[in-house]
Image (cartoon, grey):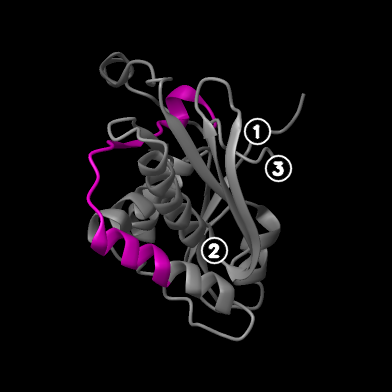
Amino acid sequence: MSKSKKYYVVWNGKTKGVFNSWNDCKKQIDGFQGAQYKSFTSKDEAELAFTKTYEEYKGKDTKKTVIDKDLLAKIGQPNLTSISVDAACSGNPGLMEYRGVNTKTKQQLFIQGPFEEGTNNIGEFLALVHGLAYLQKINQPTLPIYSDSRTAIAWIKAKQCRTKIMPTAKNKVMFDLIKRGEKWLQENTFKNPILKWETKVWGEIPADFGRK
């Protein structure tokens, strides 16, 4: 039986954030005095936990995902007449790429990267902007777009990529894309609903790179 995927929150370490592997998490806490971290069984739970404090989870069992049946009934099924986007990043920061697919068929519609010194959140943001521009180009002004990143969705609403990563010579191409993306959001309007993909109910988003 294969091991279930885990996500790791580091509240206090060399770099704080949500990490997709134990190796990435371990790099942030090894030798760091007062490290605070915990594993979760879903990306949603990990991202939610990162918005809170370590003390709220200290001593609690986070190895089991508990889903409210009423919530399941309320969420229902995803709208397959849509597109989905996702990003993958090896390290934090690390090599990042993103793509968009047809939610129903998983046909790849676009892919970009890899970019050096990127993060998942940056990739998710760029993927959403690319997806919105793509839908505008093919004249689909109301087709929904799914993302499993609450952070990226919030950045789109703010029309700004609020990353703490600093520009360098290595990530210049990526930051050029960020500037272009922010400019597009400022200059364009869209009616496409940006929806949260409920991973813990529906499984991995169709655009997932499948490297977990």
First along the sequence among labels 2 and 1:
1
Q: Amino acid at mark 3?
A: Arg
Q: How far apart are labels 2 and 1 at the CA level? A: 23 Å
Q: Is residue 102 visible?
A: yes
Residue 181: within the magenta? Answer: yes
Measuring 39% from the left and 39% from the top, which residue is drawn there? Answer: 135
Number of the label disc, if any, that sits on residue 165: none
Q: Amino acid at mark 2?
A: Thr
Total numbered labels: 3
Measuring 57% from the left and 21% from the top, which residue is drawn there? Answer: 105
Residue 54 image position (x, y, % from top left) = 39, 59
Q: Residue 198 appears in which quarter of the rendering?
A: top left
Say which quadrant the N terminus sits in. top right
Say what secondary structure mark 1 lies in.
loop
Up-down relation of residue 170 to residue 115 (above or below) = below
Q: Is residue 157 left or right of residue 163?
A: left
Number of the label disc, if any, that sits on residue 119: 2
Q: Amino acid at mark 1?
A: Ser
Measuring 75% from the left and 29% from the top, which residue is drawn there? Answer: 2
Residue under pointer 3:
211
Residue under pointer 1:
4
Q: How far apart are labels 3 and 2 at the CA level? A: 16 Å
Span highlighted in magenta in the image: 179-204
Residue 122 image position (x, y, % from top left) = 47, 62
Q: How far apart are labels 1 and 3 at the CA level? A: 13 Å
Say what secondary structure mark 3 lies in.
loop
